């Protein structure tokens, strides 16, 4: 089953987009935990795009394609902003004591930890991020 | 302070504002009851982490109780939370508070 939609690249649009994703998965009888984790993965991916891909005054859109099979969930995020690969963001230093850890960088770490494969490609003027999470069934 | 629902990109700034108010007082120990917190994202973690940092800077403590399993999983992944500040229930928290009270009176 596949589900696709577009959102404007604004932080205010995130909540509704994430509701779409979570609701779709629950309607397809995905496990609550899986739907919740996909919501988190999508939030981290989308927030990154909203913050980095487009200029602040640029009207941009993000396309979301969500595919669910018996074995996996596949989330594809496409935007036409500047070339930007969120996966290249450096990993946070998790061993450092609180005072030294920077506040950012956690989102990509969460994406990497909660998904099984991640890939980025620049296709013409489009950033394409594909995140796949295998299902435990 | 009891948290409820989601602490994410959408709700983190409201949370920050409430904490700003609280941190303006002389509070020394902040306890977050997470029993009704269903979801946390990096935005929420950043907010909690910022509070921890500010409390630590003033010699205070931040403690979290009743984390739901999926929320604890996210914390474990990012290891933002000092292990000593996460408790399963209020009894563990009481024991910890007793221990630090005793510690400070020993040192007095």
Image: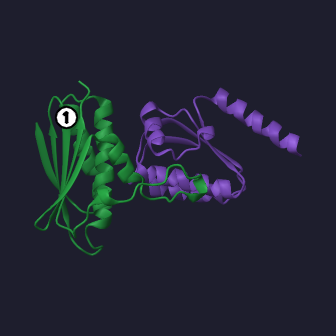
> Horizontal and vertical percent for residue A93?
49, 54
Residue sitting at x 33%, y 52%: A44
In the image, is A136 to the left or to the right of B48?
left
> Horizontal and vertical percent for residue A58?
23, 73
Task: Compare residues B5 and A135 and report the one nearer the observer.
Answer: A135
Choose top left, top right, bottom left or bottom right for residue B23: bottom right
Helix, strand or loop for disc 1: strand
Residue sitting at x 24%, y 43%: A117
Residue sitting at x 29%, y 62%: A50
Q: Can residue B11 be seen in this view?
A: no
Q: On the rendered image, what quadrant is the N terminus of chain A found in?
A: top left
- Chain A palette colour: green
Crowding near the residue tagged with mark 1, few <14, some 14–19, many ≥20 C-alpha atoms within 10 Å: some
How many discs appear? 1
Chain depicted in purple = B
Q: Can residue B33 be seen in this view?
A: yes
> Horizontal and vertical percent for residue A69?
14, 33
Chain ID for label 1? A
Task: Compare residues B9 and B106 and report the one nearer the observer.
Answer: B106
In the image, is A121 to the left or to the right of A15?
left
> Horizontal and vertical percent for residue B77?
44, 41
Q: Mark 1 points at which residue?
A: A72
Choose top left, top right, bottom left or bottom right for residue A121: bottom left
């Amino acid at each position: 089953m596949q589900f696709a939609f577009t959102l404007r690249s604004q932080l205010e649009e995130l909540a509704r987009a994430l509701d779409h994703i979570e609701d779709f998965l629950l309607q397809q009888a995905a496990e609550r935990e899986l739907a919740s984790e996909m919501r988190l993965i999508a939030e981290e991916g989308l927030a990154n795009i909203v913050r980095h891909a487009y200029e602040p005054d640029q009207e941009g859109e993000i396309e979301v394609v969500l595919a669910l099979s018996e074995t996996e969930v596949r989330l594809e995020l496409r935007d036409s902003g500047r070339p930007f690969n969120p996966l290249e963001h450096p990993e946070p230093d998790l061993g450092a004591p609180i005072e030294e850890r920077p506040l950012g960088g956690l989102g990509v770490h969460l994406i990497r930890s909660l998904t099984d494969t991640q890939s980025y490609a620049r296709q013409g003027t489009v950033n394409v991020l594909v995140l796949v999470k295998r299902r435990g069934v | 302070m009891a948290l409820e629902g989601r602490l994410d990109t959408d709700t983190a700034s409201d949370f920050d504002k409430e904490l700003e108010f609280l941190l303006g007082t002389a509070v020394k120990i902040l306890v977050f009851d997470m029993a009704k917190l269903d979801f946390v994202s990096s935005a929420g973690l950043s907010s909690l982490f910022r509070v921890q940092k500010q409390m630590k800077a003033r010699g205070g403590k931040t403690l979290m109780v009743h984390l739901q399993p999926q929320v604890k999983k996210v914390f474990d992944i990012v290891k933002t939370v000092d292990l000593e500040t996460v408790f399963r229930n209020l009894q563990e928290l009481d024991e910890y508070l007793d221990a630090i009270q005793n510690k400070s009176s020993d040192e007095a």
